[in-house]
Image: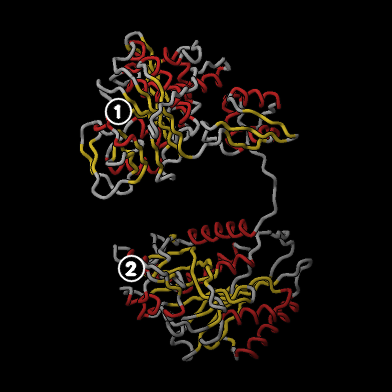
């Protein structure tokens, strides 16, 4: 849109340089892209943000300049329309068949007009605004379009069948030749202006050549209407046809401006083209002249962080031409129809900030009140610690799909009937919500090993989906691992294969980082794990997950040629028991005594049960247990294993005697012999 400053100066006195005015208008959403000087006229080239359709008119821009500068606004005079009715009945008939697409239509019939060139001042202004002058009537419709933002159209009334206007949807097969000379086929959703025979204009977009105003026109029908923005936009896109009128209708016009624009144009036509008004028909709904928004002055200061007085706020609203009714601590603000962007209290606060000056609002950091930790923050903290522990152990984080195939569901030992199937799967490979993280981790492990990786260790913190006891879908958070192949080596240590003990150590570290005691592992069979390697995790007495070697058949299905080890924890249960309160103890002041213990026990003995028995028998004096050797082979009987422990004894306040340590150590030996049939090596 082009804004000639000489024309704008008719409505408000422009005193600042164009560049300064351009900066001020930018705050209103009117971006000035260029300042032109053509034939002594200064012109602002602008682009308007979609929410400020009122700035698509010179009157709207003048209102903004008045609000920004505080200067007086002189709006153009809009005369009342005097109608000299003829004795002919039904000189003009208007029928709205689509009131949703056209809520209001004003038709003014003028007889005795004289088509001639426009006055030179009007032609110069239109040219400065980028519009080619045509004749006095057409130029007046364009002039009012630029001045008030109200699109108008003039028909040669003598070319309308039965002097009738019908606003309706296009019929199948209808065509129209528009003013640009192109013949266009109309779709059924297009809104048209028609007489009793055929369409004479595409509503809100362009008129038809058949009823074009020309040199011989003496009877004129002036259209001023309001069309639905969505209907105009859809019609414009379908026809590939845009105009200055459609540009404004698509963004929403001032509903009150329909009448103002018609009256302004009629006044100019009567003055510069002659004639008299013989009929004026106003069909449709009468729009509201204003709406109401409640504003709390105290909230303005709270939101902006600036101590603005009620008087200052009221002055800013007055400059915006908003009327205020004060009702105690809240104000009722009447919003004029042309400010369609003001709908909420926050919109008004933004307007006050804009006029006060953004540069006068200090930048301050928000005050945040300290609140106790919530479940959400506990879960977030646990997730951070778990990720840190896993990456520190050498695992890479994976993010896999939450949807899996029936083949993977059943291949993992789950029943597809118990899994949750999506209603509209995009493919068979993404048909079910995953009940475990394992399928995605196995696919990722296989993809890495097939790309020349000697080994891979992955973890994922994600959601799984299971059915509850009543059949409902439960979304749970899980933490899963997969390890296969060789661990990274160095010059100090050769590459060793991943094993169950690696994953057991990672899981134990995660639990300890969350403030929990080391989880215990109890042998238990799982369909997707190899027999004799599977176990269930228990954290502080509650079942929490599983660990083991992936069954060879399942590994083979994923094209994994090496042993694969996996584990999974219910992260929700882990978080429920997690604590981040660190308890510090003073450094010991007394010496410790170390006694080593080498045992022969059956290979089926559970390590956690051995530890529990040693810890219980050793009592308060036993402060640390360390397994430093495990051996199975020809030097021990079949089915047996040799375990060597270092037991650390210490008293908190005194030095232990040899008799005290021996008594505690003998108690440990007796407990292991009685419960596990252990023998001393």
Residue 356 percent location from the top left of the image: 60, 24
Can residue 497 be seen in the rendering of this structure?
A: no
Residue 219 percent location from the top left of the image: 32, 25
Q: Is residue 105 left or right of residue 69?
A: left
Mark 2 surroundings within 10 Å by alpha-carbon count, few (fewer than 14), some (14 through 19), many (20 or more): few
What residue is rendered at 40% in x and 45% in y?
A: 98
What residue is rendered at 48% in x and 91% in y?
A: 637
The coloring applied to the image is secondary structure
Q: Secondary structure at mark 2?
A: loop
Q: Is residue 36 left or right of residue 215?
A: right
Q: Residue furthest front?
A: 87
Mark 2 lies on residue: 427
Q: Nearer the viewer, mark 2 or mark 1?
A: 1
Label of residue 429 in the image: none
Q: How many marks?
A: 2
6 versus 248 height, above or below: above
| 517 and 339: which is toward the camera | 339
**CA gap, disc 2 and disc 1:** 61 Å
Mark 1 lies on residue: 156
Q: Secondary structure at mark 1?
A: strand
83 versus 168 height, above or below: above
Residue 85 percent location from the top left of the image: 43, 26
For the C terminus, the quadrant is bottom right
- Quick check: marks 2 and 1 in contact, CB under 8 Å? no
| 542 and 339: which is toward the camera | 339
For the N terminus, the quadrant is top left
Snapshot quadrant of residue 361: top right
| 333 and 430: which is toward the camera | 333
| 390 and 95: which is toward the camera | 95
Q: Earlier in the sequence, mark 2 or mark 1?
A: 1
């Amino acid at each position: 849109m082009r804004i000639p400053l000489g024309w704008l100066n008719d409505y408000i006195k422009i005193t600042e340089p164009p560049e300064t005015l351009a900066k001020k208008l930018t705050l209103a959403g009117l971006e000035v892209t260029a300042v032109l000087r053509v034939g002594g006229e200064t012109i602002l080239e602008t682009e308007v943000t979609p929410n400020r359709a009122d700035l698509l008119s010179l009157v709207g821009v003048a209102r903004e300049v008045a609000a920004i500068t505080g200067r007086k606004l002189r709006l153009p005079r809009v005369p009342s329309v005097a109608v000299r009715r003829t004795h002919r009945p039904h000189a003009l008939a208007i029928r709205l068949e689509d009131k949703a697409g056209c809520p209001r239509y004003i038709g003014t019939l003028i007889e005795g007009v004289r088509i001639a060139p426009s006055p030179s001042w009007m032609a110069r202004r239109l040219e400065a605004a980028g519009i080619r002058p045509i004749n006095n009537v057409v130029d007046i419709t364009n002039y009012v379009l630029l001045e008030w933002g109200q699109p108008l159209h003039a028909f040669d009334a003598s070319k309308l069948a039965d002097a009738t206007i019908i606003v309706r949807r296009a019929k199948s097969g209808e065509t129209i030749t528009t003013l640009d000379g192109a013949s266009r086929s109309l779709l059924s959703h297009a809104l048209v202006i028609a007489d009793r025979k055929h369409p004479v204009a595409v509503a809100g977009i362009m008129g038809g050549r058949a009823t074009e105003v020309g040199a011989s026109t003496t009877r004129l029908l002036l259209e001023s209407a309001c069309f639905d923005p969505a209907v105009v936009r859809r019609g414009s896109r379908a026809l590939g046809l845009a105009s200055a009128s459609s540009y404004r209708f698509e963004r929403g016009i001032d509903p009150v401006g329909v009448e103002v624009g018609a009256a302004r144009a009629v006044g100019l036509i009567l003055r510069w083209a002659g004639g008299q008004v013989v009929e004026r028909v106003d069909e449709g709904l009468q729009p509201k002249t204003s709406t109401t928004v409640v504003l709390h002055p105290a909230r303005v200061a709270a939101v902006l962080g600036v101590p603005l007085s009620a008087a200052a706020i009221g002055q800013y609203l007055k400059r915006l031409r908003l009327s205020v009714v004060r009702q105690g601590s809240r104000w009722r603000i009447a919003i004029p129809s042309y400010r369609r962007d003001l709908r909420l209290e926050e919109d008004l606060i933004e307007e006050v900030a804009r006029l006060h000056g953004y540069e006068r609002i200090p930048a301050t950091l928000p005050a945040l009140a300290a609140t106790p930790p919530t479940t959400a923050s506990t879960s977030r903290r646990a997730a951070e610690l778990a990720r840190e522990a896993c990456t520190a152990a050498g695992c890479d984080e994976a993010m896999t799909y939450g949807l899996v195939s029936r083949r993977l569901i059943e291949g993992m030992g789950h029943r597809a009937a118990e899994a949750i199937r999506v209603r509209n799967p995009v493919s068979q490979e993404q048909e079910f919500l995953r009940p475990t993280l394992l399928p995605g981790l196995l696919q990722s492990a296989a993809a890495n090993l097939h790309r020349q990786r000697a080994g891979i260790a992955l973890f994922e913190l994600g959601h799984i989906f299971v059915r509850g006891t009543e059949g409902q879908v439960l979304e749970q958070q899980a933490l899963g691992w997969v390890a296969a192949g060789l661990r990274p080596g160095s010059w100090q240590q050769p590459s060793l294969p991943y094993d169950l003990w690696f994953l057991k150590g990672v899981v134990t570290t995660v639990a300890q980082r969350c403030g929990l005691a080391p989880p215990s592992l109890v042998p238990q069979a799982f369909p997707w794990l190899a027999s004799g390697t599977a176990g269930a995790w228990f954290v502080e007495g509650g079942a929490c997950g599983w660990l083991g070697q992936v069954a060879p058949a399942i590994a083979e299905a994923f094209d994994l040629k090496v042993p694969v080890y996996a584990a999974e924890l219910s992260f929700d249960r882990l978080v429920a028991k997690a604590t981040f309160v660190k308890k510090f103890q003073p450094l010991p002041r007394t010496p410790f005594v170390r006694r080593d213990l080498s045992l022969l026990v059956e290979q089926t003995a559970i390590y956690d049960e051995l530890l529990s028995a040693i810890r219980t028998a050793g009592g308060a004096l036993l402060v640390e247990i360390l397994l430093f050797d495990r051996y199975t082979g020809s030097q021990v009987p079949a089915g047996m294993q040799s375990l060597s422990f270092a037991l650390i004894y210490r008293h908190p306040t005194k030095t232990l005697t040899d008799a005290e340590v021996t008594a505690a150590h003998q108690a440990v030996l007796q407990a292991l012999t009685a419960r596990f049939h252990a023998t001393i090596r």
